[in-house]
Image (cartoon, helix red, strand yellow):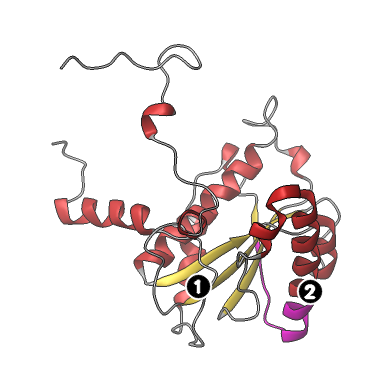
């Protein structure tokens, strides 16, 4: 017990959102409630960022024609990804990897241009801008799950093409296409697990002690 902790119910809610968050690809035809998208974006904007650079930018895709062009590009890249997977191509093509045309809202998340001017925390690890923006997306994901809203992160695209489609400046970089909206139900487990693509590793295999690959000593008995 620490003086700064939340109530037991609040703690349980946080862990529940983490545990039940899903990468959603199936959406209902419902619209989001007024102000809901704005709340989710505000949650994203509360994320930590290296050097407080706040590298995230959000493009709301409201035009149907633009949404369809983005979908067509993702479909091209889906086919190219399948070709690159070799023996697993058929398995991949059976998976639903996006809900671009069916979700209530579509956002493109990008890294701001002129990021080279931000040195604090990035001198040796410039990719920390991407890590910061990923934290923002995770904030949004957890807030969406708490509100019963589905969110799916699409990464099957060529960044330069999406940058052009969304009129983003030279030097900026789209990192995510987010499909957001109400869903009939949340998957009981990650879809790639239930579809047999892969499974979650045991945590005991991923935590090392003092040296990479060195597992912690086992507790006796």
Q: CA distance from mark 2 to mark 1?
A: 27 Å
Which quarter of the rendered picture does the N terminus lie within?
top left
Quadrant containing the C terminus in the rendered view = top left
- Residue 51 lies left or right of residue 13; in this view the side is right
> Which residue is disc 1 drawn over?
38
Residue 54: in magenta span: no
Give the left or right position of residue 189, taking residue 111 as reference.
left
The reply to whether residue 116 is visible in this rendering is yes
Say whether residue 212 is left or right of residue 171: left
* Circle 1: element type: helix
Tag 2's secondary structure?
helix
What residue range appears in magenta? 58-69
Seen in the picture, residue 98 relative to 126 is either above or below; the reply is: below
Residue 85: tell me if it is visible. Answer: no
Question: Could you tell me residue 206's position as x and y percent?
Answer: 44, 28
CB within 8 Å, label 2 to label 1? no
Place residue 154 in its image quadrant: bottom right
Q: Which residue is mark 2?
A: 72
């Amino acid at each position: 017990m620490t003086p700064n902790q939340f109530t037991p119910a609040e703690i349980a809610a946080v862990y529940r959102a983490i545990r039940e968050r899903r990468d959603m690809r199936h959406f209902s035809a419902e619209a989001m409630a007024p102000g809901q998208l704005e709340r989710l974006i505000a949650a994203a904007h509360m994320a930590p960022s290296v050097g407080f650079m706040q590298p995230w930018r959000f493009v709301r895709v409201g035009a149907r024609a633009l949404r369809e062009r983005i979908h067509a590009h993702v479909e091209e890249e889906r086919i190219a990804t399948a070709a690159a997977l070799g023996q697993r191509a058929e398995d991949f093509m059976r998976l639903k990897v996006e809900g671009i045309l069916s979700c209530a809202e579509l956002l493109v998340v990008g890294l701001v241009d002129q990021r080279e001017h931000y040195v604090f925390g990035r001198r040796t690890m410039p990719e920390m801008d991407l890590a910061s923006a990923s934290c923002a997306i995770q904030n949004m994901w957890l807030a969406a799950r708490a509100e019963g809203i589905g969110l799916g992160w699409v990464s099957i695209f060529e960044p330069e093409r999406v940058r052009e489609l969304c009129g983003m400046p030279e030097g900026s970089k789209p990192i995510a296409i987010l499909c957001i909206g109400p869903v009939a139900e949340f998957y009981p487990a990650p879809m790639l697990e239930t579809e047999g693509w892969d499974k979650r590793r045991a945590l005991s295999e991923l935590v090392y002690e003092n040296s990479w690959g060195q597992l912690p000593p086992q507790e006796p008995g």
